[in-house]
Every structure is written in C-alpha cells, then in structure tokens.
Image (cartoon, helix red, strand yellow):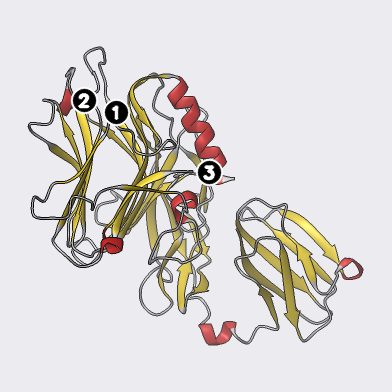
Amino acid sequence: MKKITLLFLLSLFFSNAQEVLNEDFEGGIPLTWSNENLNSLGDPNEIWTIDNTGLAYYVSATAQYMYTAAGMSGNYAIFNSDAYGDGPAEDGALTSPAFDCSGLSTVVLSFNEWFTGGYGGAAYVEVSADGGSTWTAVVNYPTTNTDLEYGEQIIDITSIVGTSANAHVRFRYTGEWSYYYAIDNVVVQQPQVSEPGACTTPTPTDQATDVTINTYATGGTTYKWVEVGFAAATTGDPASTFDVTYSLNQDLSDPVLIATDYDGTILENGSLWGTEASTGWQANTTYYWKVTANNIAGSTDSETWSFTTGAEPLSIDDYETKVFKAFPNPVADMLTIQGNLPIEQVEVFNQLGQSILTVKENALQNNQIDLGRLNSGIYFVEITSETKTETLRVVKK
C-alpha cells in the first residue's frame, strides 16, 4: 500500500512539472550518461552497473528493501564496491547528460537512494552549472558515516545551476572493497504544484498523558515504541513523504529522534526507538514533536504537539510469560496462534483502535487466521480464552 501511494503521488507531481531530466534506468544506463572510474590508477571496468533484485546486500539476504524502503522499482543504478573486491581505490562517477535550465525559475533535483556505509566507503551527489568544470556537493556521505541512508531526496538546486543551459548532475562513490551506493528515478524539474499544507490530528492527541510505551523484539534486540500517527493536510498539494521530529524541548531544539522519509500517516517504524534498558522512550517523560510534510515543491511543518509517557514497559522476561504466541511475525497471510488455553475469539485492531476482523472459535482452522487481505502495517491481535485475554502486536508485510 505504501509504495503504491507514493508512486501515485509522484506521478501527480511529475505530470504537473516541467522536466529537463528524467531517468529511471529501465533501459539500463543510457549511452548519454558518462560512467567512469575517476581514479586514474584504478580499474576502468569498476564502474556503475544495473541491478534489479531489490536486495539490500549485507543488510538482508532476502528483503527487497531497495523497493520497499528506498522507493526504487525495476532497474536501478548501483556502484557495488564490495563486488569489485580488493585493489586500487575506486571513484565511480555516473554523470548525466547536459540539461537546460534557462527556461526555469525554480530547479529541483529528486531521486531515490540507498547508501550502506562502512569500510571506508563514501558517496556524493554533485551538481555543475558549467558543463562539469566545477562541482557542488548537495549530498555528502563521508567515510565516517557508517549508517544506512535511504529514501527519496528532494533538493532545490536553483542557487547552484541558476539558468544554466549546460548543467549536469553526477553520482559518485569512493571506496576500496567497501559497500555500495544505489540510485533510481533521477528527475530535474520545475514543479508546477504547491507545497503541502500542515498535518493535523496527532496520535497521541496533543498534551495526552499516560501514553503507553510498548516493546518490540526483533533480531535479538528489544525496542521501545509509542503509537504515533497524524492526518495529512487537506490544503495544498499532497505530500510524498513525512519527517517526524521529537525533542524534550518545546522549541524542538536538540532533537532526540528524527524519523524521515515516511510515506504514510501511521508511522510503523517511526515510533521505534532504543532498547528496553535505558535508551529510547523514557517513562513519565514529556516529548514535543512535529511532522514535516514534503513534496517536490517544498516542505511544511505542523504545529508542535506534546505527549507524556506512562510507566516503563514490562521487561522481556515478563513478556515471555504470555500464554499465547503468534507466528510468523512479520506475517504475509496466515497467522498461527499457539497457546495452552482453548481460544474463544480472536479480534484484530488497527493502530487507531478500530476492530477490523473478528474470528470466533468455531471459525478457527488449526488456530490460524488469514491476514492476507489487510494492508501492510502494525496490528494488535486480541486473543480471548475462558480465563485470560492477551493482546499481541503483529506486523503485516
């Protein structure tokens, strides 16, 4: 659901924009693009290539995060330093053909990206207004950046290219048997839409108290999470992504958490933070937060809201004493419930607390319920027996 929504919104933006460059690499890397290793002592064959697996190598062997998290689709360009192995340093540059900005008053560059940092790898996105004689970096992931960077980038490059008739953009990766950088959907345009309006209707409600801190265990780590959501604006043009900023200060200075590039108003992972021990959401603490709505024309902040958390969540040992378990989690379709008590009813709620599915005892087959028709997201499965009712958190893929 999320990516369909994003692609639909982007199609609206692009259909109402004056484009001077648009490349999705579905036909491979065009001959009009320059593709070279700028290190004169390096291997000239170590250049950008095309991939279409969607796999985020060394992050997951099976999950197609390039598609589901970064917003790419089909073919995309990648400089895979790890695949080239040990040897001279690489400086792979993928440079666009010239584009003409002379008829534009505002020039915006957008693209989808995935950067896996580490082992001395660095990535840069650079723009030139003089045919490639000089370059200005608009994105810089240095060798010290060992994080994952992914999603949609929207960058106003008007101040760099001005009304140049001979402008270029290039994507560079430097490393030596490092990781990789991938990009897709490169567009330069003058938007013909307006900025989105401000988001409203926060969840939790503004100034809410005793907000529940939950826990979520995955990959051997237990995270704390708080249910967070909001309503997209009904004014301006639609947003393509949302950023959420949390702080202990009302002026939002010194943010404690920034969640970026979400394309839905229920933040499945935007509310995850820290571990169960001492980091992440703290009990009986007031947090201030805002949502920034983004589209190709610009960004708009919501009002600053607040909520105060309740007690510390149960420890993982307490959670392990639950009577019922549900698997697989995340689940694609059939969810199996396992427990020591007969099940009388299973009810599924969305993050807004709305009941969307109820299965009685006589309708349960092998203690399984089919969630295949639900949209991707977080759901709460309430299991009722004669003597006990438990609620489990389930992620629908």
Q: Residue at x 8, y 55 (%)?
A: 41
Q: Quadrant of the N terminus?
A: top right
Closer to the chain start, of discs 3 and 2, is 3
Q: Residues within 10 Å of mark 3 (few under 14, many from 20)?
A: some
Residue 249 shows in this picture: no
Name the residue that disc number 3 marks. 3
Measure how far apart labels 3 and 2 are at the Cα level.
29 Å
Name the spot of residue 315 as percent of width and height, x first. Answer: 51, 83
User: Do residues under tags 3 and 2 come within 8 Å of each other at their CB atoms?
Assistant: no
Name the spot of residue 328 as percent of width and height, x first. Answer: 64, 71
Name the spot of residue 10 as percent of width and height, x first. Answer: 46, 32
Name the residue that disc number 2 marks. 158
Measure how far apart labels 2 and 1 are at the Cα level.
7 Å
User: SS of the residue at dot 1?
Assistant: strand
Q: Is residue 160 left or right of residue 332?
A: left
Query: 61 or 47: which is nearer to us?
Result: 47
Type of the residue with mark 1: Val
Measure how far apart labels 3 and 1 are at the Cα level.
22 Å
Q: Residue at x 66, y 73 (%)?
A: 327
Type of the residue with mark 2: Thr
Name the residue that disc number 1 marks. 108
